[in-house]
Amino acid sequence: MIIAVDGPAASGKGTLAGGLANYYGLPYLDTGLLYRAVGLAISGHEDRPNFETVAIAAAQALDASHLTDVAELTTAQTGVLASKVAVIGGVRAALFDYQRNFATQPGGAVLDGRDIGTKICPEADVKLFIQADSKARMERRARQLESRGVVVDRYALYHQIEERDARDLANPNGGFYKADDAHLLDTTLLDIEAALRAAIAIVDGTMARKAGS
């Protein structure tokens, strides 16, 4: 079973995808970490003429060892860099096979990102699109960072999230939109336990309907 979980930054999709993976005993890939790792690798090059070339080379060299420093990969600044490299067609092409190979391993997998249900796994058995309003997402990300001892400027963080949304939506290489057959789950007013219960109900209901048909 392949489960695709898409949505904007800090919507809760990563926590839900990890929870679904644990519940169904499936391997899990946070594909956003791939772009964050590329962004981190090219930090300091973003204003240079060879930015795209360096970013593509970093994506081509990426492997699982680059995904281990989660604290560094999940900073707000790394998120901004990730959204800048994600608009580069060569970066997305370099990371496509990595994601496809993970998704199509025997038994299936859970993947979350921006374009899993539309580009990476259009054949996924279940697709969820997670959303929440910008203020709720800012507060979640702020609490996540503060739990690590990071001092957070909420005003700046809110605008970073808004700017990243705009960049993701305008990405000509991304396909960041809800797939026609994806189930919409708004987590603005849900805590993680309630959101996970809702996501499990969607997965179980979808698989039951497919089995019945």
Image (tube, rainbow, N blue to C red):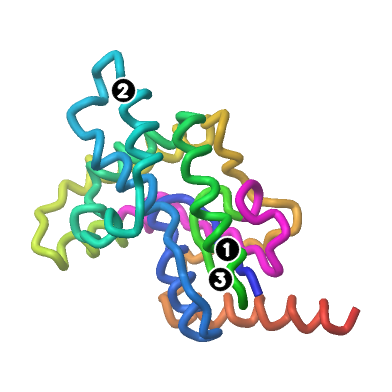
Question: For the residue labelled by badge 3, is the local secondary structure a helix, a strand or a loop?
Answer: strand
In the picture as drawn, the residue positioned furthest to the top comes out as: 49
In the picture as drawn, the residue positioned furthest to the right comes out as: 213
Please tell me how crowded label 3 is: few (under 14), some (14-19), or many (20+) other residues with Cα within 10 Å.
many
The residue wearing badge 3 is: 109
The residue wearing badge 1 is: 103
Position of residue 190 relative to residue 150, above or below, is below
Q: Are marks 1 and 3 in contact (CB under 8 Å)?
A: yes
Position of residue 81 relative to residue 37, above or below, is above
Which one is earlier in the sequence, the residue at label 1 or at label 3? 1
Residue 135 shown left or right of residue 20 in the figure: left
Structural distance between the alpha carbons of marks 1 and 3: 5 Å
Seen from the viewer's position, the closer of residues 130 and 203 is 203
Please provide percent x and percent y for residue 131: 52, 57
Seen from the viewer's position, the closer of residues 135 and 90 is 90
Residue extent of the magenta highlight: 117-138
Look at the image and tell me in which quarter the N terminus lies. Answer: bottom right
Amino acid at the residue labelled 1 = Ala
Position of residue 106 relative to residue 67, above or below, is below
Look at the image and tell me in which quarter the C terminus lies. Answer: bottom right
Structural distance between the alpha carbons of marks 3 and 2: 33 Å
Please tell me how crowded label 1 is: few (under 14), some (14-19), or many (20+) other residues with Cα within 10 Å.
many
